Amino acid sequence: MIEIPAEERGVIRIFNLDMVPEQARFLREPGALAQVLGIDEIDLDHVEIFPVSDLEELGLAGYLTQGCGIAETEITADRERLAALQGHVLLLRSRAFGGAARRLTLSSQITHVASYGERPISWSAPPQPAPESSKLYTGAKPSPRDTRAAARRIGASLFAVVMLLIALTLYVLVF
């Protein structure tokens, strides 16, 4: 019997399934695994049932550290026992129980191998300096009124130059 406390988080339990492959595949059906574990319901989105042979060279220990985020130091003591597992295994994450307390009564075909805590993700980062683009502009910026006045002066100057050129062209053509 295994007690699952309420609001448990970040624990992965590994079970060895001593059954024929057809029975192990059947445990993926809704309600089947819950019945075998002696509970009312379980969230199958947080349950994995697979043959250890599918992991090939990676092995179960490698899958737990690289695929499930379990610290290498936690698995070191159980590495030989994990490598010796044959057939199908069952991985149960804490979320499979929906935060409720549960008491698992395992059938004779299911053996608890180990329980490991997942490494918590650190969402913090070291402080970063503020980028230049986020700093306020502290230089002397002309007001919109001054900008419009400058544009008018430039426009008037260009107009005067063009008119002078036209007048000069007419003068040359006429005289």
Image (cartoon, grey):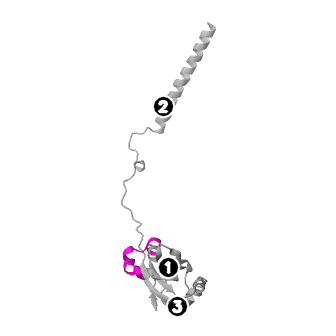
Q: Read off the residue under disc 2.
A: 150
* Front of the two marks 2 and 1: 1
The picture places residue 142, in percent across and down from the top left corner, at 44, 37
Please report whichever mark, 3 or 2, sits nearer to the chain's N-terminal start.
Answer: 3
Q: Residue shown at 49%/32% (left/top)?
A: 149
Please say if the residues under marks 1 and 3 sit with CB atoms less than 8 Å apart. no
The picture places residue 144, in percent across and down from the top left corner, at 48, 38
From which residue to which does the magenta span run?
A: 63-80
Image vertical order of residue 155 relative to residue 132, above or below: above
**Three-letter residue code for mark 1:** Arg
**Three-letter residue code for mark 3:** Gln
Q: Residue shown at 52%/90% (left/top)?
A: 109
Q: Is residue 36 magenta?
A: no
Q: Magenta stretch: dominant SS? A: helix
Which quadrant of the rendered structure holds the C terminus? top right
Q: Read off the residue under disc 3.
A: 109
Q: Residue shown at 47%/77% (left/top)?
A: 60
Q: Residue 116's quadrant in the figure? A: bottom left
Q: Read off the residue under disc 1.
A: 95
